[in-house]
Image (tube, helix red, strand yellow):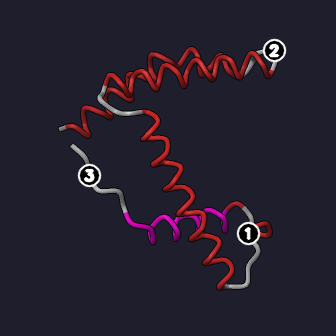
Protein backbone atom coordinates (compact mmCIF):
# COMPACT_ATOMS: atom_id res chain seq x y z
CA UNK A 1 0.00 0.00 0.00
CA UNK A 2 2.79 2.43 0.88
CA UNK A 3 4.42 1.95 -2.53
CA UNK A 4 1.12 2.45 -4.36
CA UNK A 5 0.36 5.54 -2.28
CA UNK A 6 3.82 6.91 -2.98
CA UNK A 7 3.33 6.39 -6.72
CA UNK A 8 -0.02 8.17 -6.59
CA UNK A 9 1.54 11.07 -4.71
CA UNK A 10 4.48 11.17 -7.11
CA UNK A 11 2.05 11.18 -10.03
CA UNK A 12 0.17 14.07 -8.46
CA UNK A 13 3.46 15.89 -7.91
CA UNK A 14 4.20 15.72 -11.63
CA UNK A 15 0.65 16.76 -12.51
CA UNK A 16 0.97 19.76 -10.20
CA UNK A 17 4.39 20.66 -11.54
CA UNK A 18 3.72 19.97 -15.22
CA UNK A 19 3.46 23.70 -15.96
CA UNK A 20 6.95 24.15 -14.52
CA UNK A 21 8.45 21.34 -16.57
CA UNK A 22 6.85 22.66 -19.75
CA UNK A 23 8.06 26.12 -18.80
CA UNK A 24 11.68 24.97 -18.47
CA UNK A 25 12.10 24.59 -22.21
CA UNK A 26 11.58 28.11 -23.58
CA UNK A 27 13.07 30.08 -20.69
CA UNK A 28 15.26 32.73 -22.23
CA UNK A 29 18.38 32.39 -20.07
CA UNK A 30 20.29 29.55 -18.49
CA UNK A 31 20.27 31.41 -15.17
CA UNK A 32 16.46 31.67 -15.21
CA UNK A 33 16.09 28.00 -16.17
CA UNK A 34 18.46 27.06 -13.35
CA UNK A 35 16.40 29.14 -10.92
CA UNK A 36 13.16 27.41 -11.98
CA UNK A 37 14.81 24.01 -11.69
CA UNK A 38 16.06 24.92 -8.21
CA UNK A 39 12.51 25.88 -7.22
CA UNK A 40 11.30 22.47 -8.39
CA UNK A 41 14.04 20.70 -6.39
CA UNK A 42 13.14 22.72 -3.31
CA UNK A 43 9.47 21.78 -3.71
CA UNK A 44 10.40 18.11 -4.19
CA UNK A 45 12.55 18.17 -1.04
CA UNK A 46 9.67 19.68 0.91
CA UNK A 47 7.33 17.04 -0.42
CA UNK A 48 9.80 14.38 0.72
CA UNK A 49 9.83 15.89 4.21
CA UNK A 50 6.03 15.78 4.17
CA UNK A 51 6.32 12.04 3.47
CA UNK A 52 8.78 11.59 6.34
CA UNK A 53 11.84 11.31 4.08
CA UNK A 54 15.13 13.05 4.80
CA UNK A 55 15.87 14.54 1.35
CA UNK A 56 19.62 14.80 1.97
CA UNK A 57 19.85 11.17 3.09
CA UNK A 58 17.80 10.09 0.08
CA UNK A 59 20.08 12.00 -2.28
CA UNK A 60 23.21 10.60 -0.63
CA UNK A 61 21.82 7.08 -0.99
CA UNK A 62 20.92 7.67 -4.65
CA UNK A 63 24.41 9.06 -5.33
CA UNK A 64 25.98 6.05 -3.62
CA UNK A 65 23.86 3.69 -5.68
CA UNK A 66 24.82 5.50 -8.88
CA UNK A 67 28.53 5.43 -7.99
CA UNK A 68 28.35 1.72 -7.21
CA UNK A 69 26.64 0.96 -10.50
CA UNK A 70 29.03 3.14 -12.49
CA UNK A 71 32.01 1.44 -10.86
CA UNK A 72 30.51 -1.92 -11.84
CA UNK A 73 30.16 -0.66 -15.43
CA UNK A 74 33.83 0.35 -15.41
CA UNK A 75 34.86 -3.09 -14.09
CA UNK A 76 32.76 -4.93 -16.68
CA UNK A 77 34.09 -2.78 -19.52
CA UNK A 78 37.72 -3.13 -18.36
CA UNK A 79 37.34 -6.92 -18.06
CA UNK A 80 36.20 -6.95 -21.70
CA UNK A 81 38.86 -4.53 -22.88
CA UNK A 82 36.28 -1.90 -23.77
CA UNK A 83 36.67 1.84 -23.21
CA UNK A 84 33.44 3.34 -21.90
CA UNK A 85 33.93 6.36 -24.15
CA UNK A 86 33.81 4.15 -27.22
CA UNK A 87 30.35 2.76 -26.46
CA UNK A 88 27.30 3.90 -28.37
CA UNK A 89 24.10 4.66 -26.48
CA UNK A 90 22.67 1.14 -26.85
CA UNK A 91 25.86 -0.56 -25.64
CA UNK A 92 26.10 1.92 -22.77
CA UNK A 93 22.52 1.10 -21.74
CA UNK A 94 23.16 -2.66 -21.91
CA UNK A 95 26.23 -2.29 -19.71
CA UNK A 96 24.29 -0.03 -17.31
CA UNK A 97 21.50 -2.61 -17.03
CA UNK A 98 24.07 -5.34 -16.39
CA UNK A 99 25.63 -3.23 -13.64
CA UNK A 100 22.22 -2.39 -12.22
CA UNK A 101 21.27 -6.06 -12.08
CA UNK A 102 24.57 -7.01 -10.44
CA UNK A 103 24.46 -4.52 -7.56
CA UNK A 104 22.48 -5.26 -4.41
CA UNK A 105 18.98 -3.91 -4.23
CA UNK A 106 18.12 -1.52 -1.43
CA UNK A 107 16.07 -3.20 1.28
CA UNK A 108 12.42 -2.10 1.38
CA UNK A 109 11.63 0.51 4.00
CA UNK A 110 8.50 1.16 5.98
Label 3 vs label 2: CA separation? 42 Å
Residue under label 2, please give it. Answer: 28
Residue under label 3, please give it. Answer: 108
Which of the two discs, 2 and 1, labels the residue nearer the N terminus?
2
Label 2 vs label 1: CA separation? 35 Å
User: Is 88 within the magenta?
Assistant: no
Mark 1 residue crowding within 10 angstroms, few (<14) / some (14–19) / many (20+): some
The magenta-colored residue range is 90-104
- Disc 1 is placed on an element classified as helix
- Disc 2 is placed on an element classified as loop
Which of the two discs, 3 and 1, labels the residue nearer the N terminus?
1
Q: Residue at x 57, y 58 (%)?
A: 67
Q: Nearer the viewer, residue 81 or 26?
A: 81
Position of 35 with respect to 109 (left or right) is right
Q: Judge depth for marks 3 and 1 and give the one in front.
A: 3
- Does the CB distance between marks 2 and 1 fall below 8 Å? no
Mark 3 residue crowding within 10 angstroms, few (<14) / some (14–19) / many (20+): few
Q: Residue at x 55, y 21 (%)?
A: 40
Q: Quadrant of residue 7?
A: top left
- Does the CB distance between marks 3 and 2 fall below 8 Å? no
User: Is 91 within the magenta?
Assistant: yes
Residue under label 1, please give it. Answer: 84
Amino acid sequence: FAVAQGRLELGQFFVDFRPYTVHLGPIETDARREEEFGDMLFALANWGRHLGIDPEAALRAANGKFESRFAAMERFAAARGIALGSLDLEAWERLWQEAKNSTPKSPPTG
